[in-house]
Image (cartoon, rainbow, N blue to C red):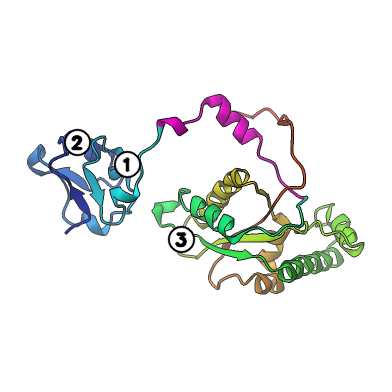
Amino acid sequence: MGLLIVDENKCKKDGVCVRECPMVIIRQKDGDGFPEIVPGGEEICNSCGHCVAICPHGALSHARVPVEQSPLISKELEISEEQAVQFLRSRRSIRLYKKQPVEREKLQRLIEIARYAPSGGNLQLVEWIVILDEGRIKTIAESTVEWMRKLLAKAPKAVPPYFPLIVGAWDMGYNSVTCNAPALIVASAPQSATTGMVDVTLALSYLDLAAPGLGLGTCWAGLVEGALQSSSAVREAVGLPEGHPYHYAMMAGYPRSKYRRVPERKAPKITWR
C-alpha cells in the first residue's frame, strides 16, 4: 500500500487534492480518475496532510497522516474577529508566579499543542526540555547572572543598561532572571533544521498562546537565551543537546495576578508597494 489511500466509494474525482498538494505530487489517473501519487512522489512527500484536510468527502487518507487521526474542524469552535483580537491582545508576559508546581500533564498538553506549529518543510524537528527541579532552575539563573557579571567586567558599556540592575537585584535576593517560575521550558532544533530558529519561535509562540487556556502564564526567558548562546555553564545546566544551535527558553507557572485590560501598542509602520 502506498502513502495515499483513496476510498473509491467516497471520492468524487473533483481534483481538489490534486490542486491543493504543495509538492505537486498528486495526479488523477488518466486525467479524470482517482487521485494517485506520481512516480517518485512518495520520496518527496513532506506529510503536510493538506490532501487529507482539503477533501470535503473524507475520501482521502495518508499512511503518515491518517484521516482517523485528523478530526473535522468544528464550526462551533470557530472564533469571531473580535474574539481573536481580544485573545491575542490579552496575552501577557507573566513574571510573578504562585508557589505552586505545574502538573506534568499540563506541560505535556501544551507541548502537544505546540507541535502543530508550522515548521520549515514540515520537518517537525523541534525538541523539548522541561525543567521542573527548583534547584536546577536556580542554578540556571545563577549561571546566567555570572555570565552577565563577566560581560559587565569585560565591557560595561557594551551591555544593555539593565544588566547592572538585574545583577544587583540578584545580589539582594531577587531573581528577575527566571522569576522563581516553577517550570522552565526550552525548545531547540538541530543544525539540519534550515529554518530552525523560526521553527523554535513558532512552536514556543503556540505554547505561549495556549497556556492561559490551561490556567498558566508564560514569559520568554531572554536573559537565559542570551547566556545559552555563549555560556557553557548555562548550556550544561540546561542540558542542551549537542548540535542544536537553535534554541529559546520560556518560563511557565500559575500567575499570581489577573490582568483586566489590554494595553495599547505603537501603531504599525507599514510600507505599501
Under circle 1, the secondary element is helix
The residue under label 3 is: 125
Residue 114: which numbered mark, if any? none
| Residue at which label 1 appears | 53
Q: Residue at x 73, y 67 (%)?
A: 134
- Secondary structure, mark 2, is loop
> In this rendering, would 197 be left or right of 137?
left
Label 2 sits on residue: 15
Q: Residues within 10 Å of mark 1 (few under 14, many from 20)?
A: some
- Determine whether label 2 and label 3 are within 8 Å by CB: no
Q: Secondary structure at mark 3?
A: loop
Q: Earlier in the sequence, mark 2 or mark 1?
A: 2
Q: Within 10 angstroms of label 3, few (less than 14), some, or many (20 or more) residues? A: some
Image quadrant occupied by the N terminus: bottom left
**130 horizontally vs 66: left or right:** right
Residue 42 lies, in percent from the top left, at: 23, 57
Q: Specify the farthest residue to the right.
A: 172
Q: Is residue 54 above or below residue 171?
A: above
Neighbours of disc 2 within 10 Å: few (<14), some (14-19), many (20+): some
| Quarter where residue 129 is shown | bottom right
Say which amino acid is labelled 1: Ala
Range of magenta residues: 75-95
Considering depth in this image, is 70 or 35 the residue closer to the camera?
Answer: 70
Report if residue 132 lies within the magenta region. Answer: no
Residue drawn at x 83%, y 57% as measured from the top left: 163
Is there CB contact under 8 Å for labels 2 and 1? no
> Amino acid under label 3?
Leu
Whole-number angstrom distance, CA of label 1 to CA of label 3? 22 Å
> Looking at the image, is mark 1 or mark 3 earlier in the sequence?
1
Measuring from the top left, give residue 28's x and y in whole percent: 14, 42
